[in-house]
Image (cartoon, grey):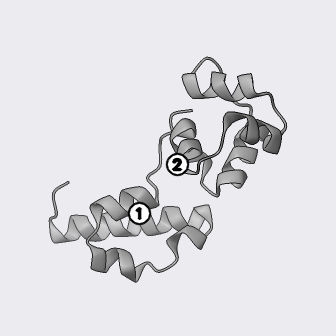
Amino acid sequence: MLNLKEIRTKNKISQSKLADAIGVSRSTIAMWETGGSQPDNDNLKALSQYFGVTTDYLLGSQKNAKYLEEQLSGKEFALLGNFRELTPEDQEDVVSYMEFKKSQRGVKE
């Protein structure tokens, strides 16, 4: 779980609190964060819903709002409005569209 620890600490949530919220042990959360084990599909979905991110983001294969803030100009990001309130699927569409628009302008990353 490449991004679990990052998102958990960013939101100032302890392993114990997260574990209680999704119904697993604290040591299970620790194992996921260190790569000792992976959550099953139900737990992955629960984590996704708890943090309001996609499962792809948790697994490290999708960019998120932090990526957009770092890569886009302030003006571009402001146009997105309440990005974090979008559904994960809509967030993915926005990211894909913004990357497409950047590629059309010839912006190098």
Which label lies toward us, 1 or 2?
2
In the rendered image of this protein, does residue 103 appear above or below residue 35? below
Towards the viewer: 18 or 60:
18
Question: How many circles with numbers are drawn on the protein?
Answer: 2
Which x, y percent locates residue 68?
37, 62
Q: Residues within 10 Å of mark 1 (few under 14, many from 20)?
A: some
Q: Name the residue type under label 2.
A: Lys
Q: Name the residue type under label 1.
A: Ser
State left or right for residue 79 relative to residue 101.
Answer: right
Towards the viewer: 42 or 6:
6
Residue shown at 75%/41% (left/top)? 17
Q: Which mark is residue 10?
A: 2
Residue shown at 72%/22% (left/top)? 27
Q: Which element carries disc 1, helix, strand or loop?
A: helix
Task: Mark 1 or mark 2: name the one nearer the start of the chain.
Answer: 2
Q: Which element carries disc 2, helix, strand or loop?
A: helix
Which x, y percent locates residue 107?
16, 63
Can the viewer see residue 10 in this picture?
A: yes
Residue behind mark 1: 96
Residue shown at 70%/40% (left/top)? 44
Can the viewer see residue 59 in this picture?
A: no
Q: Which mark is residue 55?
A: none
